Image: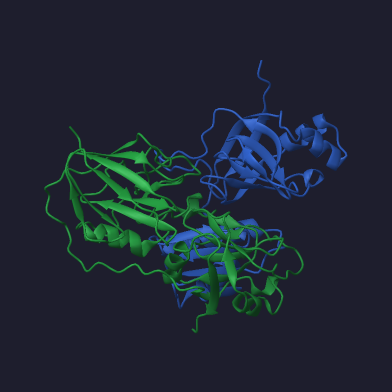
Amino acid sequence: MENEIRILTAPPGATLQDAGRTGWLHAGVPPSGPLDTTAHAAANLAVGNDPREAALEIPLGELRVLTLGSARLSIDGEAAVTLGSGEELIVPACPRAVRYLAVAGGFTVPLVLGSRSTLLLAGWGGFLGRAVRAGDALPIASPGEPPTRAGAVPTVSDPPEPAVLRVRPGPHLARMPADALAELTATTWLVSSRSDRVGVRLEGPAMGRTGDDRGPPAPMIRGAIQITTDGTPIVLGPDHPVTGGYPVLAVLGRSSQAVLARLRPRRALRFVLEAD
Amino acid sequence: MKILPYGDNALFVDLEIEDAPDRRERTQAVGRELRRRLASSDIVVGAGSLAIIGVGAWDDLDGIIAETLRADPDVDFSPKLHILRAVYDGADLAEIARQTGLRGTDVVALHAARDYDVELIGFLPGFAYLTSLDPRLVIPRRPAPRPRVPKGSLAVAGPYTGIYSASSPGGWHLIGRVLDVELFDPARHPPALLEPGDRVRFVPYRPD
């Protein structure tokens, strides 16, 4: 019998993610991959996996699983636990917005365009192209193979209140008022509950806009901070559209993307400009 | 031309040709040249802009782009023509007619009368921004996007027409739908049916 992890309960939007799908932006395919790259890598390293292996990304709520066949698991890089067949594990909700459950050997779902990451909007990748739910049986590698890697496991810290995120100026400063960057960095923003893997919306005073609010489609990247017509900043996430028409005022640094991913709705954050 | 850092590990190239009549050809020529020189990098083509992903700095970039922009853009490039069957029964056909002052049958006739060029791929996997729409059909996006536009929907917005390659929220006006075409299939090589520079013709079809 194949080893499996059976889902007993899962919050909405729990998906399998490996380190992401590189090299397909030109075909309209976003990079996907974990919201919190550090916690994802930590969970994998704690069970002896390559840090890029597929793990279960669990947003905002509790997840319960049952193992069929024994399995060695870690949550966010915490000390690995070995479960016998039929044993349950609870991944409790925590102050951070997203957690990762890794299993030694990894989840053995098929590669799609070189990656095991789920792309919800397209309905492919990961486990059947969708979020996992109660009753799903996720295939995992057989146990007993020695760890492929024994690296130091990074610590996943809870961001301070307000969290401080580093940004660089974006490519569309000329389409925004002259003081737009100063306005962005002077404001304390709140994470909106209308956020997902496509983007995190921020709540605060409406940003000033000038002229045409939408330009012709321009290439987008993860971390780009778009300012919408009504002055709302949206920080693009791993499943972002690869082009967009709103101006990009600033771009979040890579390490700050993981910090943003840890903030639950209503958490506060500030941006600081990174010196070149 | 402006070359700007784009986050930690990418470059944004603004060709500053937004209003040029040959914007599409010139941007694509630069895209092809960058891909040829940097096969390992992901080059995203926008409308008069490009992004080079995975490259934080590139000393010769200005020169390469300037040279490409000066050259004849269409040397050794032959676009593909895709002929797609379209059923013109979109939910917004009456609204498009109202906003353009045309009859519904004229909207359809104008839309099906010309071949379109794929300016760029974006928004969704395999979604092609098709130009140039007849100027009489150019209307702004819907004021509020629909929460779900079905896959295969044929739509117009601003100077573009396009086909939803996956079901998704969307703010374009629905003019119809295409039949028997998978715009993106991750198991196919290449997965995206349409590529920048390709041409698309819609043939009206009435299902019985």
Tell which of B128 and B172 is nearer to you. Answer: B172
Query: Position of A149 compared to B159: left or right?
Result: left
Above or below, A178 relative to A85: below
Residue at the (67%, 66%) spot, across then down: B17
Query: Position of B141 compared to A244: left or right?
Result: right
Q: Position of residue B146 (x, y in %)?
A: 67, 42
Residue at the (49%, 49%) spot, across then down: A27
Residue B204 visible somewhere in the drawing: yes
Residue at the (59%, 69%) spot, across then down: A189
Above or below, A113 relative to A45: above
**What tint does the image give chain B?**
blue
Supply the letter of whichever chain is green: A
Above or below, B122 relative to A179: above
Residue at the (39%, 41%) spot, across then down: A132
Q: Position of residue A13 (x, y in %)?
A: 45, 46
| Residue sitting farthest toward the top | B208
Colouring scheme applied when the structure was drawn: by chain
Tell which of A76 and B4 is nearer to you. Answer: A76
Residue B73 visible somewhere in the drawing: no
- The quadrant of the rendering that contains the N terminus of chain B is bottom right
Q: Position of residue B119 (x, y in %)?
A: 61, 51
- The quadrant of the rendering that contains the C terminus of chain B is top right
Tell which of B107 and A232 is nearer to you. Answer: A232
| Residue sitting farthest toward the right | B101
Q: Position of residue A59 (x, y in %)?
A: 43, 52
